[in-house]
Image (cartoon, helix red, strand yellow):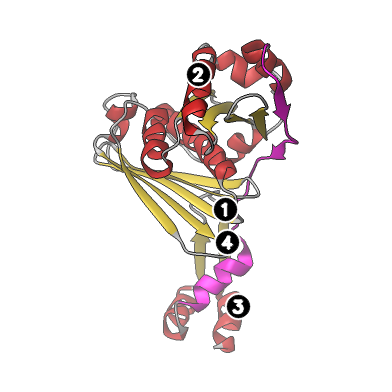
Amino acid sequence: MTSDNLYRFLFQDKHVRGELVQLSSSLDNMLLNHDYPFPVKKLLAELVAATSLLTATLKLEGEIAVQIQGDGPLRFAAVNGNNQQEFRGIARMRSELQGDTFRELVGDGHMLVTITPKQGERYQGIIPLTGESLAQTLESYFAQSEQLPTRLYLFTEIQPQHSRASGFMLQVLPVNQQQAKIDFAELAILSDTLTADETLNLPVEQLLYRLYHEENIELFTPQTVSFVCGCSREKSEAAIISLGKSIINEHIAEGKLEISCDYCQNNYVFDRNDLQIISDKL
């Protein structure tokens, strides 16, 4: 797998749709400069793939934030994405790991899914972490909030210098629910044979043919997925301005002010002259 793409597809003779996302360089860009333990990298990679799939289900322009909060060693993990398939993610620990499973990592807690459309009202769903994996938790989310049977598969390959992730989703269409559930059950049996190697390495056409060679599938144009932090020196300057003139002057006396981006770990340094120019604007 060499590209970072989201693929949408539709079973033309069944009331079911699907998505496949494959992540490579975008995931490396997100994890760069972060010294997360292996299980945290794995969960964060799964969360990025899951957020990409969730974003693709939205029929609107806007943003989505998916956050896991628990009482385990991992305090929280969060991924922000938008309908352009641009994402960023971060994780925070409260203690050293005592295990590497999903439950050992997060403990008891909940998942928050916040959808912020460019037009319309903001929506937030809160889902208890009842499953033994992120995929199970998200399947519960769809069952509760959307009332649409959904099957989700998440795979990762985490290496010191290079990481990859993939996500595969099946979901019934909100029409003819009785027949859709029958169609979904049949396709889910085939989908349960999916392996990490297939979703990480096979081209989408080959993967779909291997799974559903008797089905008539319409595959749509892929959408590029990318890591976009969004930080900049201009935004850092705006944050400094929000501190107020008196606090800025305190930092002028100290000689400089550094602002670090939590998502990409980039540092923006403002020396005494930079800060004086900002202060003079106020």
SS assignment at label 4: strand
Disc 2: which residue? 188
Distance, label 3 to label 1, CA atoms, is 21 Å
Could you tell me residue 171's position as x and y percent?
52, 31
- SS state under label 3: helix
The magenta segment:
214-242
Q: Which comes before the other along the chain, label 2 or label 3?
A: 2
Whichever of callouts 4 and 2 sits on the residue coming sooner in the sequence is 2
Front one among 67 and 261: 67
The C terminus: image quadrant: bottom right
| Circle 4 crowding by C-alpha within 10 Å: few under 14, some 14–19, many from 20 | some
Q: In the rendered structure, which disc, 2 or 1, sits on the residue that comes first in sequence?
A: 2
| Residue situated in front as seen by the camera: 180 or 222 | 180
Q: Is residue 218 above or below residue 246?
A: above
Q: Residue at x 39, y 36 (%)?
A: 143
Q: Amino acid at mark 4?
A: Tyr
In this rendering, position of residue 196 left or right of residue 94: right
- Mark 4 highlights which residue? 268
- Magenta-drawn stretch contains 222: yes
In the rendered image, residue 60, in percent from the top left (x then y), is placed at 60, 54
Which mark sits nearer the N-terminus, 3 or 1? 1
Asked if the residue at tag 2 contacts the one at tag 4, i.e. Cβ–Cβ closer than 8 Å, the answer is no
In the picture as drawn, the residue positioned furthest to the right comes out as 221
The residue that label 3 is drawn on is 273
C-alpha gap between disc 4 and disc 2: 49 Å
Mark 2: amino acid? Ala
Contact between labelled residues 1 and 4, with CB atoms less than 8 Å apart = yes
